[in-house]
Amino acid sequence: MMPEFKTIGLVGKTSDSRTGPLVARLVELLRSRGRQVHMEQDIPGFDRPDDIALLPLVELAEAADLLVVIGGDGTLLATARRIADNETPVLGINLGRLGFLVDVSPETACEELGEVLDGAYELEPRAMLEAELIRDGVTIHEGIALNDVVLHVLSVVRIIEFDTAIDGMDIGRLRADGLVVATPTGSTAYALSAGGPILTPQLDAMVMVPVCPHSLNHRPLVVSGRSTVEIRLSSGSRSPAQIALDGQENIDFAPGDLVRIRRRERNLTLIHPREHYFLRVLRTKLRWGEQP
């Protein structure tokens, strides 16, 4: 039996002037359907009634049966990392550009949200990654990513040198601008731009994509989603580097540092209206398969 969404949490992109009017329409719909509404913060252009509480994002996710994220994919990525320990499903409404994750159009948002409230929806688990940064044998940072964990050169036009292992097996030293380790969700992001393959979301896999490798022998590699990937920056690497989580959280990565990447036990749960198909999204967003 599909769960009933009685309490709805709204997360909106405050810098977009379209957010306020859209939130007003959504709130009108939700209140007409007898739903309780909470918000993360006030939205310019929307006069929040007193009975709609403001809650910090983690508390909002705990209180809500459904989280509606209004913005672009970046807004959803940031939200997903912060609520990663909560199992509240997320519906994304696209106010960004491409919108792979936030796939509901603002023009049809009220209609499609109404259908979701009626039980016409699909739940889709999306794998997430956890990254552990180790320096001199001590863990100095732990982070989460929905799209990717990226090792990249910092501020200079120069390659970096690093060693990579999969499940404890050394796969060699690589000289490149960086390395993308992506989930199937992230395979359509930076990994795709770097020449990696597209993975459908249901695959239990990760993709490793070198960024501008110095040698043509290094190619994208798809590995089990249950693998552990380790990357160590060579002590001889002369360029400063960083580790980026979803392109939003950056950590300095020094020679000798080790980053360990594995799949999280908990997934993010996305909600889609009925008749949602990933391959159809590819055709719509990327014009994949169309004739020139």
Image (cartoon, rainbow, N blue to C red):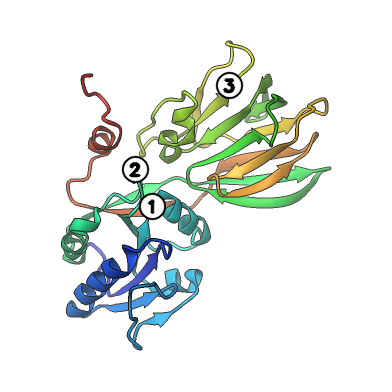
* Circle 2 Cα neighbour tier, 10 Å, few/some/many (<14 / 14–19 / ≥20): some
Decide: is 186 above or below 168: below
Mark 1 highlights which residue? 72
User: Which of the two labelled residues, at mark 3 and mark 2, occupies the earlier sequence position?
Assistant: 2
Tell me if label 3 and label 2 are in contact, CB under 8 Å: no
What is the secondary structure assignment of the residue under circle 1? loop
Given the image, on which type of amino acid does mark 3 rest?
Cys
Residue 142: x and y, percent? 66, 51
Count of numbered badges drawn on the protein: 3
Instruction: Report the residue at 62% width, 45% height from top.
Output: 131
Q: Which of 1 and 87 lies nearest the eye of the viewer?
A: 87
Mark 2 highlights which residue? 98
Q: CA distance from mark 1 to mark 3?
A: 28 Å
Quadrant where the C terminus is found in the figure: top left
User: Which of the two labelled residues, at mark 2 and mark 1, occupies the earlier sequence position?
Assistant: 1
Q: Does 40 sit left or right of 48 as displayed?
A: right
Q: Does 20 sit left or right of 172 as displayed?
A: left
Q: CA distance from mark 3 to mark 2?
A: 24 Å
Quarter-of-image position of residue 107: bottom left
Decide: is 220 above or below 81: above
* Circle 3 Cα neighbour tier, 10 Å, few/some/many (<14 / 14–19 / ≥20): some
What is the secondary structure assignment of the residue under circle 2? loop
User: Which of the two labelled residues, at mark 1 and mark 3, occupies the earlier sequence position?
Assistant: 1
Q: Does 90 sit left or right of 217 as displayed?
A: left
Decide: is 240 above or below 49: above
Mark 3 highlights which residue? 212
